[in-house]
Image (cartoon, rainbow, N blue to C red):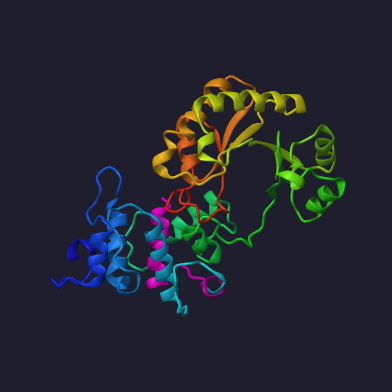
Amino acid sequence: MQNDAGVTVSGKLTVNLMAALFDMSAFVLIEGQGKSGVRSMQRYLNGKYSDELGILPCDGIYQRATNTALIFALQKAIGIAGANGNYGSGTIAATPTVSQGANGEVVRIIQYGLYVNGFYDGSCDGNYTSEVSNAVVAFRKFMNLPPFTGTSDLTVIKGLLTSNGNTNRDSIALDTSTQLTSKDVTNFKNYGFSIVGRYLTGSVGAGASKRDKYLTAAEIKRITDAGLAIYPIYEDGGYEIEYFSRIQGYRDGIKAVNQASKLGFPAGATIYFAVDVDIQDGDIDGTVVPYMEGVVSDLASSRYNLGIYGTRNVCLHGEKVGMKYSFVADMSYGWSGNLGFKMPKN
């Protein structure tokens, strides 16, 4: 068991080893789910940090504990006092910039991050080779993180290890449940935004704080007269797991398309159906997948493209059932559906 876990093989039953036995962690590759490269990373992290983090599973599945351990390893490598696996302000400030020719533990962590995000399959040996540099360029281009160089800075490193990445990076798009005034639109434009996401129907809040969130024709005119574009979102209850079923998807699809048409959205516009909750992986197939199938079966021949809003995991499922585009809830970096899942290609 110690050998499988990547820790010192002594034959002695330590407290950490006992804890790993009792939480039923797996230390061999789980066939059909785990990846050998992820398992190698898990064993390496155990070998270096199990005294501080405990013994992590070595099942080949990139999960919350693995992600936390990788951030912890970065913190140790850059000398963060009180390393805890949380990519907070201290870690952000201390994150280095490295490029081709560098070597060491930070480079190894970058290699691991590129690997689990699907951009690198080479050796994770701590050497920043041209292969690593090319993988960083590919990651930057896919995630739209200029400049498109092979250098790893905060934007790249935090982008590899967390879903929200560098939250100080520039943005041209936003979404809001607020019905926008002319002043709101002017302010957004002055701050450099050019795309606005708005809700087709419904309200937010309850009681005295309840307010309408639906897009109006007058609001559309204010937004477009200012030269901004709009993308429509549908969410009338997609924040509870019990909401999602095939019949609900069918109903929502009809309602969303009718309202988009009424507001004058042109053919080819994408409507994003919201799954605004962190649904666990094992629950998606029985809830959100039937919901999306209901939307797709109902609207596949409509004038609009179909999109899904949700965690990376939800969006990856959406790709498979016919959702043409994904609007990923990456800012919810603590959601399990974002931890360890690649960005969908659409």
* Quarter of the image that includes the N terminus: bottom left
Name of the residue lying farthest toward the front? 207
Quarter occupied by residue 69: bottom left
**Left or right of 14: which side holds 114?**
right
Task: Specify start and end residues of the magenta stretch as a single range.
Answer: 91-120
The front one of 234 and 323 is 234
**Left or right of 98: which side holds 65?**
left
**Left or right of 285: which side holds 205?**
right
Q: Tell me, yes or no, whether the highlighted magenta stretch contains residue 100.
A: yes
Q: Tell me, yes or no, whether the highlighted magenta stretch contains residue 26.
A: no
Q: Residue at x 58, y 54 (%)?
A: 331
Q: Residue 33: where, in percent of width, then height? A: 30, 45
Q: Residue 284: where, in percent of width, then height? A: 44, 38
Residue 42 shows up from this direction: yes
Q: Residue 292: where, in percent of width, then height? A: 51, 30
Q: Residue 226: where, in percent of width, then height? A: 84, 43
* Total numbered labels placed on residues in the image: 0
Q: Is residue 188 above or below residue 201?
A: below
Q: Residue at x 82, y 32 (%)?
A: 217
Quarter occupied by residue 196: top right
Quarter occupied by residue 286: top left
Residue 131 shows up from this direction: no
Q: Is residue 84 above or below residue 64?
A: below
The front one of 225 and 256 is 256
**Left or right of 15: which side holds 297?**
right
Name of the residue lying farthest toward the left? 11
